[in-house]
């Protein structure tokens, strides 16, 4: 057992439709306390702690009266300061856009301790070089001529508006960035955001008619969540409107639909995608019902996590501890998280305001908090005791 990893207290940072909470577990995995709310009544789309600076936190806060902003805490959420310059679009030609809400927050590379990235709705990418206190557009994307076509305008069928999400900084290369856009697809930069290209080869687009020449659509896709393995950065996964996919960059740039290996009666539609912090072959998803009118609930009202230990070639249903029927909730794309313990902890938050935890990699589940508002994000913060 790695003794440097186990003595960590785990805090879940929880963003909801009506504020934010923290749920703290001791190194023994016993519940210590649920604290909050913070920003009660405001939509908290994402609440994240900086792994480079324990206790340094950012929160994406939306208020119907004061508008969207980012708040910064340097003392693990005890006090907060609003960004002096929140993300905002500059006009592009005759087009002026306004940020409806900040949807996604990502810390920069370990070599750039003050850098953060933010994704917004409508789709835009922003960067901060001062720890989140001021934000500037990533001009190479937001002002790119092709960006209008890639995102399909600013109105689509995405609930609460189109999103730029899954902002990924390659841990092996600070200049290598990935983003997901719903709708639009997955896009990649190798020069810290100055230039971009689509990365969608092999992804189905069931909601568009096939092209007459039989070629694939380069953009216009709907990725729900994209992840890169934190150690083996050549391994990518993503959950899509049209399935679950895997890519091995050392073998090419085509996505493989591993969701075809899911049970047919469950399908491979859902929002969150989670990868084990050390093992690139172990992944988790939470399927939802994407049939008919897309109810976005647990299939048949029977919630379950599905786990693969072989990179998506086979899947195991994990539902011990969950309700066995009449549980019509789902899990949004930012609402699954994993800790770094040797016996991996997996956590999820539901649209019914519940926090569930598993301390055995998903084999069994227990309720940790049951009566919060609708949960928008769950992130893990770990500190030595």
Image (spheres, grey):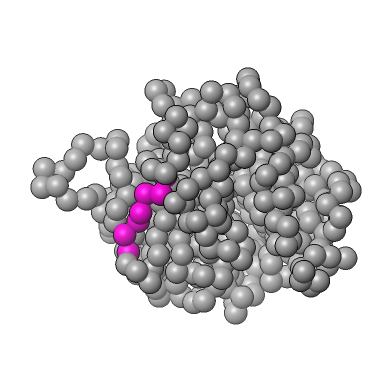
Q: Can residue 383 be seen in this view?
A: no
Seen in the picture, residue 364 relative to 343 is either above or below; the reply is above
Give percent across and percent down for residue 186. 38, 55
Quadrant housing the N terminus: bottom right
Give percent across and percent down for residue 28. 86, 55
Seen in the picture, residue 230 relative to 221 is either above or below; the reply is below
User: How many numbered markers are drawn?
Assistant: 0
Report the side of 230 relative to 144 (left or right).
right
Identified at 10% across, 47% down, the residue is 213
| Depth order, front residue of 339/192 | 339
Identified at 40% across, 65% down, the residue is 248
Asked if the stretch drawn in magenta spans residue 255, the answer is yes
| Depth order, front residue of 332/116 | 332
Task: Give the residue at the far bottom of this rendering.
Answer: 111
Asked if the stretch drawn in magenta spans residue 385, the answer is no
Which stretch did the figure color magenta? 253-259
């Amino acid at each position: 057992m790695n003794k440097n990893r186990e003595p960590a207290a785990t805090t879940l940072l929880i963003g909801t439709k009506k504020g934010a909470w923290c749920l703290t577990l001791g190194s023994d995995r016993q519940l210590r306390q649920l604290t909050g709310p913070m920003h009660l009544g405001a939509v908290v789309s994402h609440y994240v702690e900086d792994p480079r600076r324990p206790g340094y936190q950012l929160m994406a806060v939306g208020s119907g009266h004061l508008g969207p902003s980012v708040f910064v805490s340097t003392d693990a959420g005890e006090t907060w300061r609003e960004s002096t310059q929140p993300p905002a679009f500059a006009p592009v030609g005759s087009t002026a856009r306004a940020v409806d809400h900040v949807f996604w927050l990502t810390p920069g590379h370990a070599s750039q301790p003050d850098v953060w990235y933010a994704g917004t709705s409508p789709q835009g990418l922003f960067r901060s070089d001062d720890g989140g206190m001021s934000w500037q557009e990533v001009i190479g994307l937001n002002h790119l001529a092709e960006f209008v076509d890639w995102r399909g305008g600013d109105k689509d069928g995405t609930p609460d508006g189109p999103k730029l999400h899954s902002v990924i900084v390659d841990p092996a290369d600070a200049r290598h960035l990935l983003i997901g856009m719903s709708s639009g697809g997955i896009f990649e930069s190798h020069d810290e955001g100055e230039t971009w290209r689509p990365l969608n080869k092999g992804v189905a687009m069931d909601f568009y008619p096939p092209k007459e020449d039989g070629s694939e659509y380069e953009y216009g896709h709907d990725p729900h969540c994209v992840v890169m393995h934190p150690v083996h950065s050549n391994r990518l996964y993503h959950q899509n409107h049209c399935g679950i996919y895997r890519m091995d960059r050392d073998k090419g740039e085509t996505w493989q639909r591993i969701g075809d290996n899911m049970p047919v009666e469950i399908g491979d539609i859902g929002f969150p995608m989670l990868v084990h912090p050390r093992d690139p072959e172990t992944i988790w998803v939470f399927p939802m019902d994407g049939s008919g009118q897309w109810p976005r609930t647990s299939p048949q009202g029977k919630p379950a996590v599905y786990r693969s230990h072989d990179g998506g070639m086979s899947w195991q249903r994990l539902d011990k501890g969950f309700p066995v029927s009449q549980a019509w909730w789902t899990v949004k794309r930012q609402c699954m998280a994993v800790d770094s313990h040797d016996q991996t902890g997996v956590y999820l938050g539901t649209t019914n305001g519940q926090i569930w935890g598993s301390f055995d990699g998903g084999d069994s589940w227990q309720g940790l908090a049951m009566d919060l508002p609708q949960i928008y994000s769950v992130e893990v913060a770990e500190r030595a005791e």
